[in-house]
Amino acid sequence: MTKAERRTAVGGFLWIVAMVQYFVAQVVVEAQWRTPYSWWDNYISDLGNTACGQFMANYVCSPLNGVMNASFIIAGLLTVAGIGLMRSMWPATGMASLGVLLWILAGAGKVLVGVAPENENLALHMIGALNLPLGSVAILLLGLASRRTGLGVFGIVMALVGLAGLALSIFAPDLIGVGGAERLAGYPGNLWLFVVGAAALLPRREQASAEVLTQVS
């Protein structure tokens, strides 16, 4: 394994850890709510709300808010570290470089979401929440830059689903609930991070074989 392959593998491992801990944190924190938490009607950020009381349309009370906010920060930091280590997975084009830059900004936004909980500094929190559209656009650019590969096609599909979820959360959030729309906007990007992270752990020879098979099929 070359030095570049080792760097890529480490980056992939960081992305897998980031996404696993992020989803585990949501399940664990949600389970400790004294009032029912709805994955359809509550925002993900409600899990990191540091107070008990009415916030926007919902009553929130998250005893393990610190765990969720730490998870946001960890996910953001590992996302940034991972994209830096995995840059060689994509072609050296302007489109791919822009996609990498947007992922760095998206990771920084995720950190900001954890540093500034929604009830403490909503303005900063909303700036951090831009990680959702930034991530989807970044995936789209990286997918287009590598569109002849299986991972490239997968990225384009995930990006379009995420952008559709974003549009839904803006224009028709009540259709599936604000929490459901937010998850439709964000979870495709989380899945992409996990899948690409797993692919990065494969030796380059196996990656190339998988891409050829995907193209042929």
Image (spheres, grey):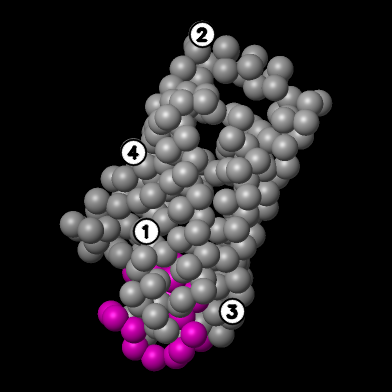
Mark found first going from the N terminus, 4 or 2: 4
**Seen in the image, is 69 located left or right of residue 122?**
right
Q: Please name the residue shown 32% across and 57% down the image.
A: 181
Q: Amino acid at mark 2?
A: Val
Frontmost residue, 39 versus 143: 143
Tell me the distance, in whole angstroms, between the alpha carbons under discs 4 and 2: 24 Å
Label annotation for residue 66: 3
Q: Amino acid at mark 4?
A: Leu
Frontmost residue, 26 versus 3: 3
Tell me the distance, in whole angstroms, between the alpha carbons under discs 4 and 3: 32 Å
Q: Amino acid at mark 1?
A: Leu
Q: Please name the residue shown 53% across and 16% down the image.
A: 214
Q: Please name the residue shown 76% across and 34% down the image.
A: 6
Pointer 4: what residue?
A: 160
- Please tell me how crowded label 4 is: few (under 14), some (14-19), or many (20+) other residues with Cα within 10 Å: some
Label annotation for residue 30: none
Tell me the distance, in whole angstroms, between the alpha carbons under discs 1 and 4: 16 Å
- Please tell me how crowded label 3 is: few (under 14), some (14-19), or many (20+) other residues with Cα within 10 Å: some
User: Which image quarter holds the N terminus?
Assistant: top right
Q: Secondary structure at mark 2?
A: helix
Is residue 210 in view?
A: yes
Is residue 42 in view?
A: no
Tell me the distance, in whole angstroms, between the alpha carbons under discs 3 and 2: 48 Å
Pointer 2: what residue?
A: 216
Mark found first going from the N terminus, 2 or 1: 1
